[in-house]
Image (spheres, rainbow, N blue to C red):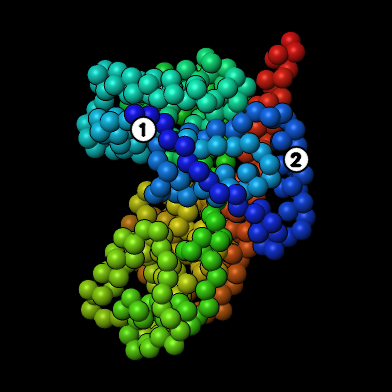
Amino acid sequence: MSLVKVVEVPRRPVSLLEPIIGEQRYLNLIETADQVRRQLAGRTIWNVNSTATGGGVAEMLQVLCGYVSDVGIPISWLVVTGDAEFFAITKRLHNQIHGARAGGPLDAADAHHYTRMLTANAVELLGRIQPGDVALLHDPQTAGLAEPLARAGARVVWRCHIGVGWENDATRAGWDFLRPHLGAAEAYVFSRREYVPSWLPDDKVSIIPPSIDPFSPKNQDLDAATVQAILATLGVLDGATPRVPGGFVRRNGEEGTVARQAVVTGEGRPGPGDPVLLQVSRWDLQRHATVIAQKSLAEGFGLTVSEGMWKSRPVIGSAVGGIIDQIADGTGILLPDPTDLTAFGRAARLLLDDHAKAARLGQAAHAYVRENYLGDIHLMRYAKLLGTLIAEGSSTQAG
């Protein structure tokens, strides 16, 4: 039985982005794609992670790989697997990097099992990944692949999507577990500078934040009548009779179930014209919200914030993790202390009462996401990294 699975990603027309990002940014993207294609000279970019569905990483890979394929750059996506013990180990590792000891410490036996499972995956990967190809390894589940792939001649980049901006015994233990596996990588990518371990060489680190997909069902434009119809069909709004069909399609129906139960079991439901202060992550209720809150106590990056901002909604967010990067001055309200309920109440009251201010912040928020967190910006940052990596490899070979 094969350990490695190929994820088939359909091409996604990159031209879809032009009406959103404008002609100049679109032309820059096409020109950069041509340059990267020439630099690669037929070599393939391989994305390797541990899941094809669920979660933000898989969502982004579907989108970005689709765009890259459309511009003629060879790119593929492979998923490694393991047994239940392997994923229990990597879950504990994930918790540690986020500062929690949930699941207990990892010992030598865990390290041996982790290495053994990834060594078995590497054998299969090397039947596909050729010397000179770029292997983009995602998150702790793949760190153990860096050494065998690099030894076989692949250009290895390790991309970490998680982290916190502080240290404790748990984070140190998590990074100590990974450190022996990461030395073989030629480059490292993090979402935030604050998440980079101090022992990684700074000249090998790139900061590439994630991006949203404006065309996904949760982010695409919906008119007010359609939004109200959906919410009325769900039972979220009182006193609303759908005037258009309330049907919608979601790949993960559980999120809708949770959102519906959270409202229906409350003491009352808002009417169609009532202001709504909303915190429901990753759900299209954002289109109806007056104000969106993201009151996290800790956060990796939190693209839910950008998804709300893309819908021109003002966001009140805790000043933690990637929320700090997304809510720039004049685009929303950052709460210095996530536990200060009085400050949160004042901010919510301000935006619910001052419609003009809320609208200004919402418009600025949409513009900020357009400039910083769409797919073309994401790809341009990767192109810069790949250009540097390939150029360094060429100069090394020449020397």
Considering only order in the chain, which callout, 2 or 1, is on the residue closer to the N terminus? Answer: 2
The residue indicated by pointer 2 is 34
Distance Cα–Cα, label 1 vs label 2: 34 Å
Q: Amino acid at mark 2?
A: Asp
Point out residue 177 in the picture as x, y percentages from the top left corner: 35, 23
Q: Residues within 10 Å of mark 1 (few under 14, many from 20)?
A: many
The residue indicated by pointer 1 is 81
Q: Residue furthest top?
A: 399
Q: Residue at x 63, y 36 (%)?
A: 74
Q: Residues within 10 Å of mark 2 (few under 14, many from 20)?
A: some
Secondary structure at badge 1 equals loop
Q: Is residue 14 left or right of residue 136?
A: right
Of the pair 16 and 171, the residue shown nearer to us: 16
**Marks 1,2: beta carbons within 8 A:** no
Q: Is residue 205 left or right of residue 83?
A: right
Q: Residue at x 47, y 50 (%)?
A: 59
Q: Amino acid at mark 1?
A: Thr
